[in-house]
Amino acid sequence: MSEELSSSAKKVQDALISHGLTSQVLELPSTTRTAQEAAQALGCQVGQIVKSLVFMGKQTQKPILVVASGSNRVNERKLSELVSEPIKRANADFVRERTGFAIGGVPPVGHSERLETFIDEDLLKYQTIWAAGGTPNAVFKLTPNDLKIITKGKTVTIT
């Protein structure tokens, strides 16, 4: 782990501090781009990994963040119903423009703008969870309650 955080990881660390959390962003020597890679690197269950997935409204073009358990797939039909419009997966340029982060390192906090956020209820069954920290090899540990606080997200059944 590096002692000096990259600029993206530092942005996430600063956002955590601004929310009053003591979580530390860690930059690991191996990639944590996928939930499976992150779970292996951290020695935890895949379900404890928070996947930050960005979608967009097809009509409004608004960004929508889903923070899902690493072991789950998002049901896009359910998400469309929740936001009352058809949605699609956002492309890499849209994700970077609207969050300030690249796909594979999108954290649940510290975005360029406020994103409507939905939290996968399955994350609530764990005492601790791990989220991306701004780069493909940065992570931080938090509780499901911390996740609810920092995202101001709505807890839903999304699978």
Image (cartoon, helix red, strand yellow):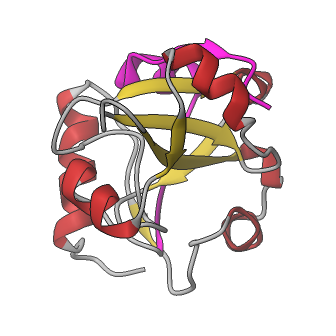
Left or right: residue 133 versus residue 89 is left
**Residue 141 visible somewhere in the drawing:** no
Q: Nearer the viewer, residue 82 or 9?
A: 82
Quarter of image, res 46: bottom right
**Residue 146 visible somewhere in the drawing:** yes
**Image position of 116 with respect to 11: above or below:** above
Q: Position of residue 97 (x, y in %)?
A: 20, 57
**Image position of 19 with respect to 76: above or below:** above
**Image position of 51 with respect to 121: above or below:** below
Residue stretch in magenta: 137-159
Left or right: residue 80 versus residue 95 is right
Q: Position of residue 82 (x, y in %)?
A: 58, 15
Q: Determine the residue positioned at 44% across, 54% down.
A: 90
Quarter of image, res 122: top right
Quarter of image, res 18: top left
Q: Determine the residue positioned at 24% across, 43% down.
A: 110
Identify the image quadrant of the N terminus: bottom left
Q: Position of residue 73 (x, y in %)?
A: 78, 46
Q: Nearer the viewer, residue 73 or 77?
A: 77
Looking at this view, name the residue that lies furthest to the bottom: 29
| 152 within the magenta span | yes
